[in-house]
Image (cartoon, rainbow, N blue to C red):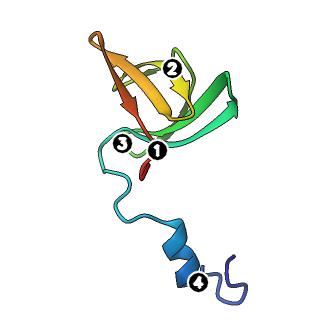
Amino acid sequence: MANRESGTTPANVAGHATQKDALRRNHLSLLGLFGVKNNLSAMMRMPSGRTKVVTRGSRLSGGQVIAIDADGVILQKNGKASRIEMPGS
């Protein structure tokens, strides 16, 4: 909870809620998963820093999204599949 007087988050709360260097700059990263279990969407951070919501079939610079499950996003590029997991998992 933010400190209402100063508008800042207490250090002990911020320490539990954040991970140092969890997102690598200039890389594709998974920020979150949402939706119903059999039709998940994902919020991705692009290498440029912009965010994009993707679903199965979406195209990204890292390839095409071929699946999204509770463990992350699976991309296919040049016939090779790779998984992107949540940072810190």
Identity of the residue furthest to the top in this view: 79
- Where residue 14 appears, as percent x and y from the top left, is 53, 74
Dot 1 alpha-carbon crowd within 10 angstroms: few under 14, some 14 to 19, many 20 or more: some
- The answer to whether the residues at label 2 and label 4 have Cβ atoms under 8 Å apart is no
Instruction: Kindly identify which residue carries mark 4.
Output: 10
Q: Earlier in the sequence, mark 1 or mark 2?
A: 2
Q: Earlier in the sequence, mark 2 or mark 4?
A: 4
Instruction: Kindly identify which residue carries mark 1.
Output: 86
- Where residue 22 appears, as percent x and y from the top left, is 38, 56
Q: Which mark is residue 67?
A: 2
Instruction: Kindly identify which residue carries mark 3.
Output: 48
Residue mark closest to the camera, 2 vs 4: 2
Of residues 43 and 13, the one nearer the viewer is 13
Residue mark closest to the camera, 3 vs 1: 1
Of residues 49 and 63, the one nearer the viewer is 63
The residues tagged by marks 4 and 3 sit, at their Cα atoms, a distance apart of 30 Å
Secondary element at tag 4: loop
Dot 3 alpha-carbon crowd within 10 angstroms: few under 14, some 14 to 19, many 20 or more: few
Residue at 52% over, 14% down: 57
Residue at 63% over, 27% down: 40
Q: Earlier in the sequence, mark 4 or mark 3?
A: 4
Secondary element at tag 3: loop
- Where residue 69 appears, as percent x and y from the top left, is 55, 28
Q: Quadrant of residue 83?
A: top left
Residue at 58% over, 77% down: 13
Identity of the residue furthest to the bottom in this view: 5
